[in-house]
């Protein structure tokens, strides 16, 4: 499942992939496709199975 969010470093829109099989709460690190810095992605599913993501910096 593709979710659009924003890079917390460069502010560019990015697309992250969520695997619904990984559970309703997920946290992992993915490099920004624009600036290549590591983004901590937190994803959680609502009751309808749709995911919301938080993108946080992983450097402080
Ligand atoms: Zn970036």
Image (cartoon, helix red, strand yellow):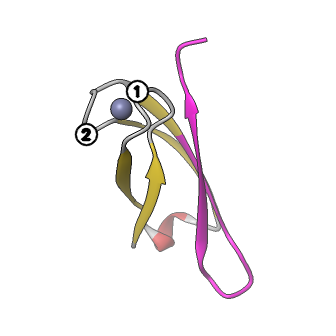
Residue that lies at the very extreme toward the top in this rendered image: 60
Residue under the image location 46 percent in, 33 percent down: 39
Quadrant hosting ligand 1: top left
Viewport quadrant of the C terminus: top right
Crowd rating for badge 1 (residues with CA inside 10 Å; few <14, some 14–19, many 20+): many
- Measured along the vertical axis of the image, is residue 18 above or below residue 32? below
Can see residue 39? yes
Residue under the image location 39 percent in, 73 percent down: 1
Q: Which of marks 1 and 2 is in front?
A: 2
Q: Position of residue 20 (x, y in %)?
A: 49, 72
Secondary structure type for disc 2: loop
Q: Which of the numbered marks, if any, corresponds to residue 17?
A: none
In the foreground, 24 or 33: 33
Q: With 37 as the anchor, is 24 left or right in this view?
A: right
Q: Position of residue 16 (x, y in %)?
A: 38, 55
Q: In which quarter of the image is residue 52?
A: bottom right
Secondary structure type for disc 1: strand
Can see residue 18? no
Residue that lies at the very extreme toward the right in this rendered image: 47
- Measured along the vertical axis of the image, is residue 23 above or below residue 32? below
Q: Would the CB of label 2 be found within 8 Å of ligand 1?
A: yes
Q: Which of the numbered marks, if any, corresponds to residue 33?
A: 2
Disc on the earlier residue, 1 or 2: 2
Residue under the image location 71 percent in, 76 percent down: 46
- Reading the image, the residue beneath label 1 is 38
């Amino acid at each position: 499942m593709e979710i659009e969010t924003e890079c917390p470093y460069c502010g560019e829109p990015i697309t992250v992939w969520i695997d619904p099989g990984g559970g309703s709460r997920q946290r992992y690190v993915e490099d920004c496709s624009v600036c290549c810095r590591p983004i901590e992605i937190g994803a959680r599913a609502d009751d309808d199975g749709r995911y919301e993501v938080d993108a946080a910096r992983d450097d402080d």
